[in-house]
Image: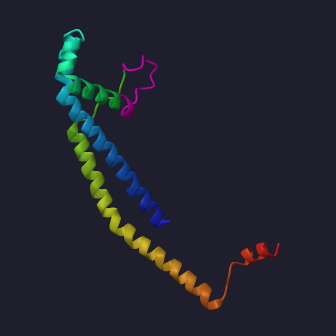
Amino acid sequence: MRRDSLQTNIVSAEHRMKEIAVLQTHIMNYLKTKEVYAGYRKSGYSKKYYTEHAGDIELCKKSKKAFDELLPSDDSGKTAGTHKKKLPSLKELRAEYAQLLCEKKAAYPEYCKAKSEYRDLLTYQANFVSLFGIENVSAEQQKER
């Protein structure tokens, strides 16, 4: 049905938009904290350095973990973690988000119209049944059994 396909398209666009927003957040966090994490590694994972920059280091670790979850490794048989998909740029993500938003906005009025038509058809069907007294014959046969 047209209404269902439009709804599916809108929901899938919204889902992808949420994924893009999460990925953008993690990329921004990673870019802000990668220098601090590099300093932590250069310090030999010093406890003193960690206590001074604990928030940034943990944020960087969370971002890296999110990249591993959101961008799975290739199935090339290589060691896990060595062949990750390349991170998309923020510019690419923003462009994809804008495109999805335009598609969603374009599909939504048509979806509302199709939903209204479907609701009208259900009303017509209910009116027809009540006017002519036609009920579901199979339901009556099941009651008799």
Whole-percent x, y for residue 90 in the image: 21, 38
- Magenta residue span: 68-82
Residue 50 falls in which quadrant of the image?
A: top left
Q: Residue at x 27, y 48 (%)?
A: 97
Residue 128 shown left or right of residue 36 in the figure: right
Residue 77 against residue 120 in the figure, above or below: above
Q: Name the residue at the right extreme.
A: 145
- For the residue pair 73 and 68, the one nearer the viewer reads as 68
Whole-percent x, y for residue 93 in the image: 25, 42
Residue 19 against residue 83 in the figure, above or below: below
Give the total of numbered labels: 0
Say which quadrant the C terminus sits in. bottom right
Residue 71 shown left or right of residue 120 in the figure: left
Q: Residue at x 19, y 13 (%)?
A: 48
- For the residue pair 20 and 77, the one nearer the viewer reads as 20
Residue 11 falls in which quadrant of the image?
A: bottom left
* Magenta span contains residue 79: yes
Q: Name the residue at the bottom extreme.
A: 131
Residue 56 falls in which quadrant of the image?
A: top left
Residue 14 shown left or right of residue 33 in the figure: right
Q: Residue at x 45, y 25 (%)?
A: 75
* Magenta span contains residue 104: no
- Helix, strand or loop: magenta stretch: loop
